[in-house]
Image (cartoon, rainbow, N blue to C red):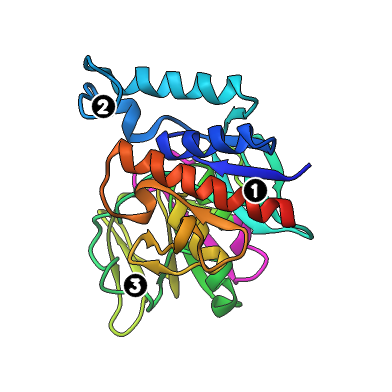
């Protein structure tokens, strides 16, 4: 049976799931949380609701509807999306999933950390993609700035290629499950420094850490992170999509806030429906 995997359980992802499930496609939704909608107190501008409804209630209704129609909803953090022998392989904290097509719908990307030197040295030693850039640091010392499973996944990608990897938690405790060979520095980071390229990381106390590159992996990976690693085109942190939510990568679609535009539930639901119709057509031909 053709299969579609949706990364994100907000209005765009759930709308896509509803359309895909109704089309008889094996549909899986992977989500870590309810995103921005789950934190919204009142919604009064969404069609069909005469009275005010809360974000969590609207989200719960959407999940129930998708599940009733046959979509499989799984709460797990997605750490990577890669090409497989056929279709895609999606890595999560709960295991891996295969799919003929993938719809990215994790909402707007997270902000770049407010640490001096990050933006100034982007592309000159500051990277957001271990799979993309590990090759350029063969035998060199690098750092991963972040915490949690996403940062660990970036470190695992780097370890077999580079000379050394240090996880910088910026004051947070080190996570569990550290891969062998990964160094950890828990000191708060004050700056990433260098003239023409990254040369070191400075801390609130103690000596700086000499590195050739710093990979940013804060929070959890978002749609733009996955799209970038697969070769889709981005405008800043917004995924560029064509008709029906199609990206430049065959079989990869995007919907909702991660594509920019009006950051409203109405647009997210519309995007999800259009991306689903495109993904359904692609999956049936795969």
Query: Could you tell which of marks 2 and 3 lies nearer the N-terminus?
Result: 2
Residue 134 locus on image (x, y percent): 57, 71
Q: Which residue is painted at 27% across and 29% down in the image?
A: 46
Q: Relative to 86, is 152 above or below? A: above
Tag 2 residue: 40
Query: Could you tell which of marks 2 and 1 lies nearer the N-terminus?
Result: 2
Tag 3 residue: 122
Q: Relative to 112, is 231 above or below? A: below
Q: Nearer the viewer, residue 8 or 66?
A: 66
Which numbered circle lies on residue 275? none
163 displayed left or right of 146: right
| Element under disc 3 | loop
Q: Nearer the viewer, mark 2 or mark 1?
A: 2
Where's the N terminus, which quadrant? Answer: top right
| Element under disc 1 | strand
Would you say residue 282 sits in the magenta stretch? Answer: no
Q: Nearer the viewer, residue 106 or 185?
A: 106
150 displayed left or right of 90: left
Tag 1 residue: 90
Q: Which residues are magenta?
A: 156-174
Mark 2 nearby-residue class (10 Å; few <14, some 14–19, many ≥20): some
Q: Which residue is painted at 54% across and 45% down in the image?
A: 276
Mark 3 and mark 1 in contact? Answer it, CB < 8 Å: no
Residue 110 locus on image (x, y percent): 34, 49
Query: Could you tell which of marks 3 and 1 lies nearer the N-terminus?
Result: 1
């Amino acid at each position: 049976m053709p299969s579609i995997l949706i990364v994100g359980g907000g209005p765009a992802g759930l709308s896509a799931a509803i359309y895909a499930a109704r089309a008889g496609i094996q549909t899986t939704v992977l989500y870590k949380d309810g995103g921005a909608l789950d934190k919204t107190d009142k919604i009064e501008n969404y069609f069909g609701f005469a009275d005010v409804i809360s974000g969590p209630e609207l989200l719960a209704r959407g999940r129930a509807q998708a599940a009733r129609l046959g979509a499989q909803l799984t709460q797990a953090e997605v750490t990577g999306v890669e090409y497989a022998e056929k279709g895609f392989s999606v890595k999560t904290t709960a295991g891996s999933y295969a799919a003929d097509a993938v719809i990215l719908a994790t909402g707007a990307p997270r902000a770049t950390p407010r640490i001096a030197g990050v933006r100034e040295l982007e592309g000159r030693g500051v990277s957001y993609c271990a799979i993309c850039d590990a090759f350029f640091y063969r035998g060199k010392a690098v750092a991963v700035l972040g915490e949690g499973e996403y940062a660990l996944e970036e470190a695992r990608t780097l370890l077999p290629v580079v000379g050394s990897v240090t996880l910088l938690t910026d004051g947070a405790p080190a996570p569990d499950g550290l891969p062998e060979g990964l160094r950890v520095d828990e000191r708060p980071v004050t700056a990433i420094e260098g003239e023409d390229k990254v040369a070191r990381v400075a801390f609130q106390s103690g000596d700086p850490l000499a590195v050739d590159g710093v990979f940013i992996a804060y929070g959890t990976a978002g749609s733009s992170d996955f799209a970038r690693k697969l070769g889709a085109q981005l405008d800043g942190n917004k995924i560029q999509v064509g008709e029906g939510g199609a990206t430049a990568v065959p079989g990869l679609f995007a919907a909702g806030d991660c594509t920019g535009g009006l950051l409203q539930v109405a647009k997210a639901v519309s995007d999800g429906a259009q991306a689903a119709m495109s993904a359904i057509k692609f999956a049936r031909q795969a």
